[in-house]
Image (cartoon, helix red, strand yellow):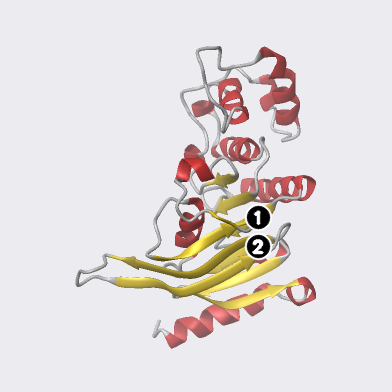
Amino acid sequence: MLELKNIDKYYNQGTVNEMCLFHDFNLSIDDGEFVSVVGSNGSGKTSMLNLICGSIDMDKGSIYIGGRDISKEKEFKRSSYIGRVYQNPAMGTCPSMTILENMALADNKGKFFGLKAGTNKKRIDFYRESLRQLNLGLEDKLHVKVGSLSGGQRQAMALLMSTMTPIDFLILDEHTAALDPKTAELIMELTDKIVREKHLTTIMVTHNLRYAVEYGTRLIMMHQGDTVIDVKGEEKARLKTEDILSKFNEISIECGN
């Protein structure tokens, strides 16, 4: 279980531009849940992910995973058990390295590197078979540099690489936003397949309301650092895209937009 307890987060604290994003924010996510998170710009979606991953510090509060307090752990430590796929396909892979080298790097996440070769030849068949499951023909391009691939191919690789080693959580930070509609559909189908097969606890931030409704077991809408919708199970199954859009419009009117 992931628990965020009594979180405070300020930006530009002590200046005329001070902004309180989270005040006494609480959220619990059970093991095995696939949570879709929606909300307008500035609602706190990505900041919440950054707090969980350790990319930014909180001003008050605690974060627990499986009852263990990780609040003081550095980002690189958390990355050993939290997989993250970013909006920009370029951020999840190394463009100057080959597909094989990228796969080997992901395969060794959390391990100590010595002076031995970075690629274990005994694992090449495993990498090839893993890539074959993407149905993108990448298994036959192991020695091609990742920088020459399309955005969709790189994002598919990033998704695969982030889940190669055992992880407690998968964080998806608008991971289809930079892709064309057809490729975005492919990546969402692949995401759902990987999450289901590996039984991953997943948090997906998205601006695509249809994806938020169609995928996952729970849906959260955020506004000004708080949750205004939180549904799961049968209640989520009955939810329609129009319901979420209606809430967005209601909030927009309240804010004078």
Q: In x, y percent, where is residue 111?
A: 57, 28
Comes first in the chain, label 1 or label 2:
2
Q: In the figure, residue 163 lies in which quadrant?
A: top right
Alpha-carbon span between mark 1 and mark 2 = 6 Å
Instruction: Tell me: residue 146, above or below residue 243.
Output: above
Given residues 29 and 162, the one toward you in this image is: 29
Residue type at mark 1 is Thr
Mark 1 near mark 2, Cβ–Cβ under 8 Å?
Answer: yes
Give the structural element (helix, strand or loop) at label 2.
strand
Image quadrant holding the C terminus, namely: bottom left
Badge 1 marks a residue whose secondary structure is strand
Please tell me which residue is depicted at 53% across the width and 42% down the height of the picture. 79
Q: Which residue is mark 1?
A: 202
> Is the residue 166 above or below the residue 56 in the image?
above
Instruction: Say left or right for 60 vs 79.
Output: left
Residue 114, image x, y percentages? 51, 17
Q: What residue is at 72 percent from the left and 49 percent from the top?
A: 195
- Category of crowding for the residue at label 1, using alpha-carbon neighbours closer than 10 angstroms: few (below 14), some (14–19), many (at least 20): many
Label number found at residue 35: 2
Q: Identify the residue shown where x is 57% and y is 48%.
A: 180
Judged from this view, the residue extending furthest toward the front is 68
Neighbour class for label 2 at 10 Å: few (<14), some, many (≥20)? many
Query: Which part of the image, by quadrant, shows the N terminus?
Result: bottom right
Give the answer, above or below, for where 233 lies relative to 148: below
Residue 130, how many percent across, how many down? Answer: 73, 30
Q: Is residue 72 above or below residue 210?
A: above
Amino acid found under the numbered disc labelled 2: Val
Residue drawn where x is 59% and y is 31% of the image: 106
Find residue 124 and report its horizontal and vertical position in percent.
69, 18
